[in-house]
Amino acid sequence: MKRIQVRCDEHIGTISLDHPEKRNALSEDMVGEIIAALRDLAAEGCRAVVLRAAPGAKVFSAGHDVAELPEGRRDPLGWDDPLRHLVRAIEQHGAPVIAMVEGGVWGGACEVVLACDLIIAADNATFALTPAKLGVPYNVSGMLTFLNTAPLHIVKELTFTAQPIDAVRAERIGIVNRVVPTAELEATTLALAQTIAANAPLAISVMKEQLRILAGAHPMSPQGFERVQGLRRLVYDSADYREGIRAFKEKRRPMFEGR
Ligand code: LCV
């Protein structure tokens, strides 16, 4: 079953998340379809790619497919986590990927959107970083995605509260490039994509890769990395992590005990 729609018109590709039954949760299958679509659009010579939900979506994406998260004893957000593959595929895609956002963006879907090169949001868009709500130990590269996008105090507010912020605040912080009325979202995004597509694709592709390398150039000692991994293991081996996942599946509020 296809969970996305893909098209390429005049050097501009569009990938539409289209699995509303599960609020576009980023399952392994959906991620695989998106990554394959990025590869196909590159082969077709698309000079910009728009990542969107179906028109009128109330939820852009509900984030990780929680049903696919391990219930402890294994890092849920390790190198081979599907969402990590998707973030890397977007960051390494040769052409700019523009997130065209309407509706709610939840959890790991925020990282996917923030990993895009530009973000155009409708005025009904919201963004919520949810690891603390589920009890999930977010990983180092994911945190770096957030830190490359928003000031430290804002990242702490978003990750510690797990509460959504609206598009106007996201623009004021600098998380999104533009906020427009929903009715203007498609036209604004298309005009931006066409402007980019009319410029030199090789120069843009090289500048995108330069910026990826520079943005990721953060020294971390082996000791520092090992400490982070040890701390994260405490979380994903905790009763709280198992409680967060179970509470989600049982559609109830989690009762965290700090162990
Ligand atoms: C699987 C889902 C999901 C879903 N997975 O519709 O960033 S981290 O660290 O937290 C990371 C681990 C992560 O990304 O975790 C996921 C974070 N996401 C969230 O916390 C959002 C969870 N979803 C919701 O709060 C609601 O579903 C929203 C507000 C998105 C939409 O609410 P609405 O009332 O419109 P339902 O909740 O009724 O969901 C419709 C169907 O989609 C499934 C949900 O289980 C339900 O399936 P059933 O009809 O089979 O019951 N669904 C929603 N989100 N992340 N499945």
Image: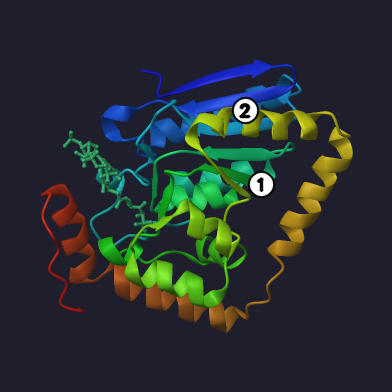
- The amino acid type, in three-letter code, at marker 1 is Asp
Q: Is residue 150 above or below residue 20?
A: below
Q: Quadrant of residue 36?
A: top right
Ligand 1 has an atom within 8 Å of the beta carbon of the residue at disc 1: no
Which quarter of the image is occupied by the C terminus? bottom left
Q: Is residue 150 above or below residue 227?
A: above
Label 1 environment density (alpha carbons within 10 Å; few <14, some 14–19, many ≥20): some
Q: Position of residue 33 (x, y in %)?
A: 48, 27
Q: Which residue is denoted by mark 2 in the rendering?
A: 187
Q: CA distance from mark 1 to mark 2?
A: 18 Å
* Mark 2 CB lies closer than 8 A to ligand 1: no
Q: Disc 1 or disc 2, which is closer to the eye?
A: 2
Residue at (61%, 32%) from the top-left corner?
Answer: 50
Q: Quadrant of ligand 1?
A: top left
Between 65 and 232, the one lying in front of the other is: 65
Q: Left or right: where does residue 94 sit relative to residue 190?
A: right
Question: Is residue 35 among the parts visible in the rendering?
Answer: no
Vertical relation: 97 (above or below) 243: above
Which secondary structure, mark 1? Answer: loop
Quarter of the figure with residue 27: top left
Q: Amino acid at mark 2?
A: Ala
- Of mark 1 and mark 2, the one earlier in the sequence is 1
User: Which residue position holds label 1?
Assistant: 117
Residue in view at x 41 percent, y 50 percent: 126
Q: Residue at x 63, y 33 (%)?
A: 189
* Whole-percent x, y for residue 119 in the image: 59, 45
Q: Can residue 70 be seen from the camera position used here?
A: yes
